[in-house]
Image: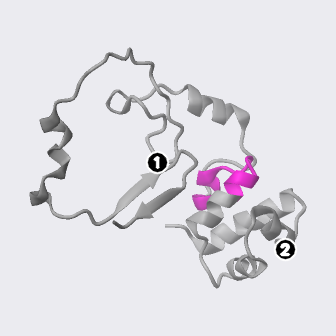
Amino acid sequence: MVNIDDFVKRLEIILDYYALNASSFADRIGVQRSSMSHLLSGRNKPSLDFVMKILEVFPDVDLYWILNGKGSFPKNNEEVLETVKTPAPASQENFTGGDLFSQINYKEVQKTETTPSPEIKNQNLIPEQGEIEKIVIFYKNGTFKAYNP
């Protein structure tokens, strides 16, 4: 869980580092100035969208550092390289780091043509599983969309 007071202190460090005031910082990341004011005063907690906008506009900010103080600011290029070079665990061959926001490493797989049988193709549409409540699509940039049929 994110400690709001510590988060605000780290946010102020970012403001000082880039020599920005709260208003200009809010404008740069695309949030309302009042949102920034409420966050700095401790009235509101940061949303995931707010944190993602910071990371998008200021690539030197480390996700783990801004959220819980682990890591460093600005990012150390050696740390970034070590994260990318780390081999994927055997159970999670496609991921480095093992968390939702890690970069995906795709292995080249030799494609073979297969023809799915109609029985398997329709297997997911069996009514005994109930109706679909929600479909969520996750994008590589960390955003998602939810659809309610």
Furthest residue toward right: 19
Q: Amino acid at mark 2?
A: Ser
Query: Residue at the location (16% across, 30% down)?
Result: 117
In the image, residue 80 sits, relative to residue 41, either above or below, namely: above
Residue 86: where, in percent of width, then height? 52, 27
Residue 10: where, in percent of width, then height? 71, 63
Tell me the tag on residue 137: none
Q: Amino acid at mark 1?
A: Leu
Left or right of 28: which side holds 76? Answer: left
Residue 13: in magenta span:
no
In the image, residue 128 sits, relative to residue 2, either above or below, namely: above
Q: Which residue is mark 2?
A: 23
Determine the secondary structure under disc 2: helix
The residues tagged by marks 2 and 1 sit, at their Cα atoms, a distance apart of 31 Å
Residue 91: which quarter of the image?
Answer: top left
Residue 36: which quarter of the image?
Answer: bottom right
Task: Specify start and end residues of the magenta stretch as a single range.
Answer: 54-68
Residue 19: where, in percent of width, then height? 90, 61
Query: Residue at the location (45% across, 34% down)?
Result: 95
Tell me the tag on residue 100: 1
Q: Nearer the viewer, residue 57 or 17?
A: 57
